[in-house]
Amino acid sequence: QDCFDMGDGHWYGGGEVFDQSWPIDGDTSLMGDGGRADVPYVTGDFFHNDFAGVLEPYWINTDGFGFFALHENPLFVSWNSSGDHRLCLKSRYELPYPVAAVAGQQELGLRYTVCSTADVKAMHLYALSQNFWPKPRDIPDQRVFEHPIWSTWARYKTLVNQARVLSFAEQILQYGFNNSQLEIDDRWESCYGEHRFDADKFADPSAMVNQLHSQGFRVTLWIHPFINAECPSYAEASPHVVSDANGVPLMTNWWQGNTAGYFDFTRASSGDWWAERIMKIKTDYGFDGFKVDAGETNWLPVGFDFGQRLAANATPNGYSTAYCRTMERFGGITEIRTGWAAQDIPIFTRMLDKSTVWGKANGLATLIPTLFLFGLEGYAFVLPDMIGGNGYNTILPDKELFVRWMQANVLMPTMQFSYTPWDYDLEVVDIALKMTSLHYEYSPLIIELARQALTTGQPINRPLWWIDPTDSVAQTIDSEYLLGDDVLVAPVVQQGAVTKDIYLPKGEFTLSRKRKQNVLPVFYQILFDIPYFFLKKKQTNCLK
């Protein structure tokens, strides 16, 4: 175990969490003790675990100090536990790490790199130069950068069926919207993991997909790595699910099943068997791609054993990596929600389900901080969650929240709707048409920045300190973001606000749409608009 005083600087990095902050030394009151105490550093579901699906053992601060722990460590982390203002890295063989390693199969160690540079940006650029994680090998599907995804999930939940999908498509076209794809989400299967359509809900999937194609839609399908024990195909599938050291299949539970197998993607033959079944859906019905769910380690059953299939059997996070690499074969239209040392895969990384609320309880206020975290940790191709959140505790998001969410999302890499603008009124439809047009207008820049990430590893959307890393105010801004170096977006993310104090870092900024140059850092805004700025003249003393 090694512990470090956090000092007076601000910190960034770590894992995707429910109450995402930027910087991470900010408001963590939802954790009770103001921090995290000795938690395993593994991918999970933050509704039940400390972290969600995306994390790297990487932390940097505004004093130019940084840590990167090797992926093979059986790592536990304490962060400001009980207000002690320390970061502690611990290595030990306890669950969820393979406890068999205690018997001497694996040597226990704690290996990490400590770096010190001039400032936070210099620290991050140095980390990128050292290839702590792989850079993307290519960019994913360009159309997803250009036009919104339309998902059935939040709007229909598990009540989706063929008639509703076709009606949804008609409405999208009726109101004049474009698309990257229409996504059929949960409850299309006859049994979870059976990979067959429920004939009562989808009488003719091929005809449905053909009709959608004729209307200009690409069509994607929700898939997952589970098979429920009651499914007819379970016996055939059981050799391919996660097993114990004796090869006995194990059972787990997940949000759609209390007894299920979890396919083992660390075993190449099992990953191939599963992927062939998924590919058969694609070819039989004409689907264009998939939304991929789960893949985190918290779904692994107790007693799992991967043998020597992972590079180092000290951590279960290698399961998430193997899962991501299997998904790559479905092409650049694919989206996943987990990542561990998988930044090189040219697919989209989705934020875990956001709640339909304003604040830090996984709501709108966490959207930009989560965007920053993904970009900082090398996942450039960010797919923000559905505009307005998932609506688990409401029938429909509040109109103001929906509009503000849409505006905040507009110059992020991608946009995704499920609740629709016409669920409200024509005013919201008009705003949404303007926002999707604005996103399309900037999509060439987004795609160019995506291409640059292949060689630089730098994020598409950047925090304000990217312009001036020593600016103490910019270091704390969590409600404005940059698109590249030259476009600053300042959405309103507070309920009821009609004005916003906008902080502009060093440089000459001009307000968008040929308005007069912004002089005061205050901009009056009603529901119709979003302020964004162009950096007209870069300062010569900015870190390049």
Image (cartoon, rainbow, N blue to C red):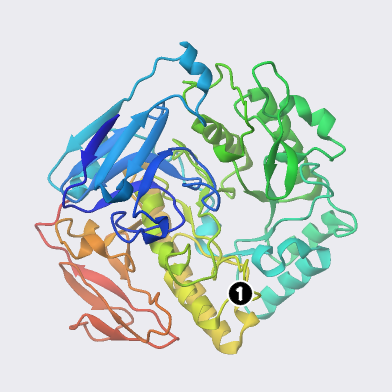
Circle 1 SS class = loop
The image position of residue 264, as x and y in percent, is: 65, 29
> Residue at image x 62%, y 26%?
304
Residue pointed to by mark 1: 177
Give the tally of numbered discs.
1
Q: Quadrant of the image for the N terminus?
A: top left
Q: Quadrant of residue 493?
A: bottom left
Label 1: how many Cα within 10 Å (few below 14, some 14–19, many 20+): some
213 horizontally vs 304: left or right: right
Q: Is residue 123 left or right of residue 339?
A: left
Q: Is residue 305 visible?
A: yes
Q: x, y (%) of residue 447? A: 43, 56
Camera-side residue of 258 and 504 = 258
**Coordinates of residue 400 in the picture (x, y in percent):** 50, 82
Name the residue at 26% across, 50% down: 11
Q: Where residue 67 appears, x then y in whole percent? A: 26, 37
Q: Farthest residue toward the top?
A: 104
- Residue 506 as seen in the image, left or right of residue 330: left
Q: Nearer the viewer, residue 88 or 341?
A: 88
* Residue in the foreground of this view, choosing between 468 and 541: 468
Which residue reaches farthest left? 541
Give the amino acid at mark 1.
Answer: Phe
